[in-house]
Image (cartoon, helix red, strand yellow):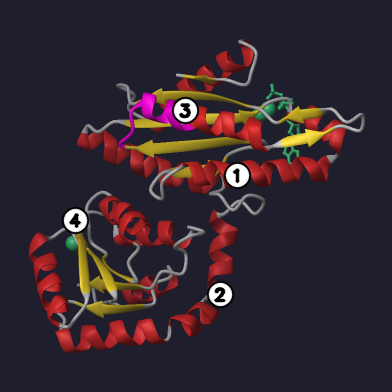
Amino acid sequence: MTKILAIDDTPYNLDILKNGLEDEGFDMVTAQSGREGLMLIDQERPDLVLLDIGMPEMDGHQVLQQIRLSDEYGDLPVIILTANTEDSNLARCLESGANDYVTKPFSFTALVARVNNVLRTQKDAIKLTREAEKLRDLAYRDEMTGLLNRRAFFERANAEFEIAKSAREPLSVAILDIDHFKQINDTYGHPKGDDVLRAFGKLLKSSLRLHDVVGRIGGEEFAVLLPNSKPMDAYNIFERLRTRLIKEHLLSNEDGTIRPVTVSSGIVGMTDQKELDGLMILADMALYRAKNQGRNRTIV
Ligand code: GH3
Ligand code: MG
Ligand code: MG
Ligand code: MG
């Protein structure tokens, strides 16, 4: 059965979509915010997403961007539901990677036809949008690791920070820095150093949830914003990552000995900071302490 996730901040719209599409034989899941929608994509693995654009906090464009940047869900078909019928808005919806759009108010016949059409032509649509995806990647993605680049990280992280601040929700920020990376380059060569960065990026991403914001913000420096997470939750995640990294990523020396790759991390939770920058400075201070205390550790 085809599972559809509808994301809309208006409960009434969700009821209409759920009832109407269930009658058409679809399995329906609903979310009232962008962030809840991203969580449900992880949990429910829908075949298609119906996405409202005008939502407070995280709007539809931001949700779509997050989906398209995901390795796992990047190809997920998305149909945008929008009340704004201006050409510029509709063009923007398609440019940001939507497979199709439906303008509100919509007829169910048209909506169901578009859903079926998108599902059928999903593969062709991927090919057609590949060029656009490449351009988007250039702007947002760090080429080496596939994570968000520095600019995109701060853009997304600032948006999450504002949401958490106004909703008075917990949030954690972490900065991670690979230990003695210069020595890794000097000992094993720059290409091997690049391999370590790629492997670390992959491990980091796989330790986190789809709605966590994760980027490479410097050469061997990474940053993560975890919405709705207390510092101790983040600590447990990064400690697991740290011990896994040491076990799984070993560099062998010519004399047969091995050298594990290690990482130091600084974590902070939401404080009375008015700006994300303030939290980043505190996370950097925690990282500095981790380095000073001997590296290969996580400090909250
Ligand atoms: P610390 O434990 O204090 O963090 O020491 P470190 O050697 O990791 O830190 P330092 O800042 O002294 O060196 C970072 C090194 O990372 C220097 C730079 O050449 C290297 N680097 C930065 N970007 C890249 C990259 O894209 N690829 C590779 N292979 N190396 C990089
Ligand atoms: Mg809305
Ligand atoms: Mg370092
Ligand atoms: Mg560094």
* Whether residue 58 is visible: no
172 within the magenta span: no
**Is 300 drawn above or below residue 12 in the view shown?**
above
Disc 1 and disc 4 in contact, CB within 8 angstroms: no
**Quadrant of the drawing holding the N terminus:** bottom left
Q: Position of residue 32 (x, y in %)?
A: 19, 56
Disc 2 and disc 1 in contact, CB within 8 angstroms: no
Q: Which residue is mark 1?
A: 201
Is 103 on the left or on the right of 18, as rendered?
A: right
Q: Position of residue 293 (x, y in %)?
A: 61, 10
| Ligand 3 located in image quadrant | top right
Q: Which residue is mark 4?
A: 32
Label 3 residue SS: helix
State yes or no: Cβ of the residue under disc 3 lies below 8 Å from any atom of ligand 4.
no
Q: Which residues are magenta?
A: 228-237
Label 4 residue SS: loop
Disc 2 and disc 4 in contact, CB within 8 angstroms: no
Look at 57% across and 43% down and name the residue there: 203
Look at 52% across and 17% down and name the residue there: 285
Which amino acid type is marked by label 2?
Answer: Arg
Q: Which residue is mark 3?
A: 280
Q: Position of residue 36 (x, y in %)?
A: 26, 51
Q: CA distance from mark 2 to mark 4?
A: 30 Å
Is 137 on the left or on the right of 75, as rendered?
A: right
* Circle nearer the viewer, 1 or 4: 1
Disc 4 and disc 3 in contact, CB within 8 angstroms: no
Look at 44% across and 44% down and name the residue there: 213
Which amino acid type is marked by label 1?
Answer: Gly
229 within the magenta span: yes
Q: Which residue is mark 2?
A: 130
* Whether residue 255 is visible: yes
